[in-house]
Image (spheres, grey):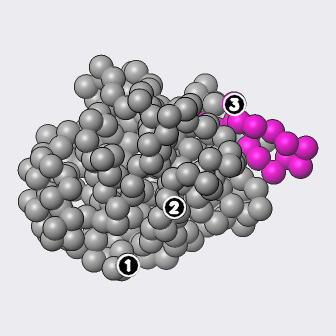
């Protein structure tokens, strides 16, 4: 696997390589690795520890590197790697992220600024040039699904066990951006998700319909580009202080 810096450099310097058919970017390695979306006939499981996730979709390990493009730069993020799985059925898509984290950082029990977070990001529309990896750019919006280990109005009920190793509630947000510091909430929230922390590991599942009528959302009618970010609250990571993976290919075919 090529180092993270290779993907970032190509994403920033050679964006024109990715055409409307995003799989074209594989030819000159300006995106990657490939996350193959598995097809499933039944209901997509919400539980991150459902046996389906270990038996069905192919697990792809993705390197997370430092965020050194915008301030505040973050040369040494705690999370170095995330494992990605994805599956779809006739109507929906589920993406599962898994990463090591020895400390569950949340504000479920008390107020905390630094909490564990993760996000995936997609261009809203496929175009000749992919948006900048720094949360898109003017005229080239991105759709961001962000999870936080935090309770709130949009908390999705999690699954509790007797060891209290799992978070009872978490916040899932459906967002847009057209450049750094332009993150905005969507009025229509279409993404759901559940995360569990146990055995010093987070597992997070995002779930959404393949297509919808929301013009601010990415539509999964073909393969799409996807980027990933993870924040470790115990390392005081927030905003631009995170581990990131540049444009990957989420292959639906």
Mark 3 lies on residue: 157
Q: Is residue 156 above or below residue 20?
A: above
Q: Nearer the viewer, mark 2 or mark 3?
A: 2
Residue sitting nearer the eye, 127 or 222: 222
Whichever of callouts 2 and 3 sits on the residue coming sooner in the sequence is 2
Q: Residue at x 45, y 57 (%)?
A: 229
Which mark is first along the chain, 1 or 3?
Answer: 1
As helix, strand or loop, the secondary structure at mark 3 comes to strand
Residue that protrudes farthest toward the front in the picture: 41
| In this view, 155 is above or below 134 | above
Q: Closer to the camera, 187 or 165?
A: 165
Label 3: few (<14), some or many (≥20) within 10 Å?
some
Drawn side of residue 24 relative to residue 147, left or right: left
Disc 2 and disc 3: Cα gap in Å? Answer: 26 Å
Identify the residue under disc 2. 59
Residue 202 visible in the snapshot: yes
- Please identify the quarter of the rendering in which residue 3 is found: bottom left
* Magenta residues (range): 157-173
68 relative to 170 in the view: left or right: left
Within the magenta stretch, is there residue 165?
A: yes
Q: Position of residue 33 (x, y in %)?
A: 34, 66
The residue lying at 58 percent from left, 58 percent from top is: 98
Magenta region, main secondary structure: loop
Q: Please give the residue where the numbered disc 1 appears in the rendered image.
A: 1
Q: What residue do we see at 44% from left, 39% from top?
A: 88
Distance between the alpha carbons at the discs numbered 3 and 1: 37 Å
Residue at 20% across / 56% down in the picture?
Answer: 23
Measure the C-alpha gap from mark 1 to mark 2.
14 Å
């Amino acid at each position: 696997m090529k180092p993270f810096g290779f993907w970032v450099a190509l994403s920033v310097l050679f964006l024109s390589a990715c055409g409307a058919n995003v799989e074209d970017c594989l030819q000159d390695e300006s995106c990657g690795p490939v996350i193959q979306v598995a097809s499933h006939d039944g209901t997509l499981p919400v539980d991150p520890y459902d046996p389906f996730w270990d038996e069905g979709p192919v697990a792809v390990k993705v390197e997370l590197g430092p965020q050194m493009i915008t301030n505040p730069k973050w040369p040494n993020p705690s999370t170095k790697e995330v494992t990605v799985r994805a599956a779809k059925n006739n109507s929906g898509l589920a993406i599962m992220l898994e990463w090591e984290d020895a400390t569950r950082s949340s504000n479920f029990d008390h107020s905390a600024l630094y909490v564990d977070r993760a996000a995936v990001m997609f261009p809203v529309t496929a175009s000749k040039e992919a948006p900048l990896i720094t949360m898109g750019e003017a005229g080239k919006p991105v759709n961001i699904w962000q999870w936080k280990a935090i309770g709130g109005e949009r908390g999705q009920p999690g699954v509790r066990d007797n060891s209290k190793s799992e978070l009872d509630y978490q916040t899932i947000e459906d967002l847009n951006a057209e450049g750094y510091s332009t993150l905005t909430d969507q009025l229509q929230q279409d993404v759901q998700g559940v995360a569990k922390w146990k055995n010093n590991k987070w597992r997070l599942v995002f779930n959404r319909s393949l297509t919808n009528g929301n013009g601010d959302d990415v539509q999964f009618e073909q393969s799409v580009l996807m980027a990933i970010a993870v924040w470790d609250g115990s390392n005081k990571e927030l905003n631009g202080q995170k581990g990131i993976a540049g444009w990957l290919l989420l292959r639906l075919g």
